[in-house]
Amino acid sequence: MTGEAIQLVEGRSCEGCTLCCKLLGIKELDKPQMAWCQHCAPGTGCKIYESRPTECAKFYCDYRTQSALDERWNPKTSKIVVVYRGNDRAMAVYVDPSRKDAWRKAPYYPQIKAWANSLCPQNGQVVVWEGNNAVAVMPNRDKPLGQGEQGQLVAVFSKMTPQGMIYDAVLMDKEASVESVMHKVGKT
Ligand code: SF4
Ligand code: SF4
């Protein structure tokens, strides 16, 4: 979601999808992630389209905005919604709880790992939400972080070792500052 004009990939549509109305949380509606919005007609559309929250009106998943994600990434069939937030270099991969292993297969996993290889060295992160369970995907490993709640953030840390750079990640408490988390994991 962004305040800038959104460039959509030509020839793509949301027709028959609506998966973001289940997998993503909507603050304005107090809707948790991984639960259908009460206003959604699954597979059809929004029942309050004209008055839907701004958050919804401004949103398109990366399948709609990134031509590099080909038809195999269409959420309607992949059951995966990808959202990249450029300001934070944060890639979030939301996976339908009914198909929560979908991301572990090709072509998804190799691409998700490639994003981690590129973003983690730039202080970015890749987090897969298998339903409400978060998995941090990092160059050296994938770390299950347990059950997360709406609004929780993931902190990814790097450390240089004789074997090269390694990464670790923690799910932050809602109220925790990054500094306190860094202290807990021994970075200060
Ligand atoms: S997940 Fe993507 S393709 Fe599906 S309805 Fe939402 S924005 Fe459209
Ligand atoms: S208000 Fe409409 S667009 Fe927004 S999540 Fe609910 S069904 Fe989807």
Image (cartoon, rainbow, N blue to C red):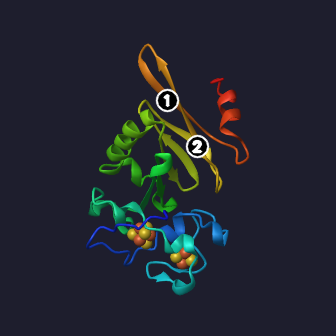
In this figure, which residue is indicated by the disc labeled 1? 167
Cβ–Cβ under 8 Å for marks 2 and 1: no
Left or right relative to 41: residue 187: right
- Residue at left offset 35%, top offset 63%: 65
User: Residue 83 in the image: x percent, y percent?
Assistant: 45, 57
Nearer-the-camera pick, 44 or 69: 69
Using a 10 Å C-alpha cutoff, classify the residue at mark 1 as few (fewer than 14 neighbours), some (14 to 19) or many (20 or more).
some
Residue type beneath disc 2: Val
Q: Secondary structure at mark 2?
A: strand
User: Residue 173 in the image: x percent, y percent?
Assistant: 70, 44
In the image, which disc is placed on residue 154?
Answer: 2
Tell me the CA gap for discs 2 and 1.
Answer: 13 Å
- Residue at left offset 67%, top offset 68%: 30
Using a 10 Å C-alpha cutoff, classify the residue at mark 2 as few (fewer than 14 neighbours), some (14 to 19) or many (20 or more).
many
Nearer-the-camera pick, 114 or 147: 114
**Quadrant location of residue 72?**
bottom left
- Residue at left offset 39%, top offset 67%: 6
Q: Quadrant of ligand 2?
A: bottom right
- Which residue lies most toward the front here? 4
In the rendered image, the vertical position of residue 13 relative to residue 178, given as above or below: below
Task: For residue 5, say whether it is visible.
Answer: yes
Quarter of the image with the C terminus in it: top right
Q: Secondary structure at mark 1?
A: strand
In the rendered image, the vertical position of residue 37 relative to residue 168, given as above or below: below
User: Residue 7 in the image: x percent, y percent?
Assistant: 35, 66
